[in-house]
Amino acid sequence: MQISTAESVVMEVMWRDGPCYAEQIVSEVTASRDWTAATVKTLLNRLLNKGAVQAERIGRRYLYTPVLNRDDYITQESQGLLDRLFDGQVAPLVSYFSEQQKLNQKDIAELKRLIGKLDDSE
């Protein structure tokens, strides 16, 4: 399932807060973005049509619940990035960031820790 960057902003609210009424989502998104309520509702409808969320009518309101799991979305997007830009390989991605001096000491330490963990599991 493909969702746009704008749709992912709406999804983040539900992933963080759980099921939400439309007005909760509108309130949170418009507080951090220069978007109108109509824009947010359009994005909610797109997500509903894609099956990324489900809506339950409660009285005159709709309660939106994410169907798309955040971890599944991250996996899909990460793999897509690797496939599009780095031929599916992680090492060239890390190399690119190191060459662009985008890795700080904390990042490097974390990468070393992860590599050590991988080495230990072999």
Image: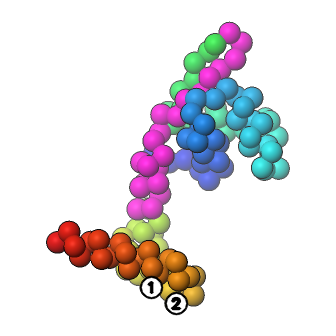
- Label for residue 95? 1
Residue 72 pos. (x, y %): 42, 48
Check if residue 64 falls in the magenta segment. Answer: yes
State the residue at coordinates (47%, 39%).
68
Say if 107 sits above or below 25 in the image.
Answer: below
Front residue of this view, candidates 106 and 6 = 106
Residue type indicated by callout 2: Glu
Residue 56 pos. (x, y %): 57, 18
State the residue at coordinates (29%, 71%).
117
Range covered by the magenta-colored residues = 59-79
Crowding near pointer 1: few (<14 within 10 Å), some, many (20+)?
Answer: few
Front residue of this view, candidates 48 and 71 = 71
Rounded to the nearest whole Å, what is the CA distance between mark 1 and mark 2? 6 Å
Front residue of this view, candidates 7 and 24 = 24
Residue 7 seen anywhere in this rendered image of the structure? no
Check if residue 117 falls in the magenta segment. Answer: no
- Looking at the rendered image, the quarter that the C terminus falls into is bottom left
Q: How is the image coloured?
A: rainbow
State the residue at coordinates (53%, 83%).
105
Residue 47 seen anywhere in this rendered image of the structure? yes
Mark 1 touches mark 2? (CB < 8 Å): yes
Residue 32 pos. (x, y %): 78, 49
Residue type indicated by callout 1: Ser
- Label for residue 38? none
Outermost residue, top side: 59
Badge 2 marks a residue whose secondary structure is: helix
Q: Is residue 107 left or right of residue 59?
A: left
Residue 82 pos. (x, y %): 42, 69
Q: Quadrant of residue 76?
A: bottom left
Residue assigned mark 2? 99
Badge 1 marks a residue whose secondary structure is: helix
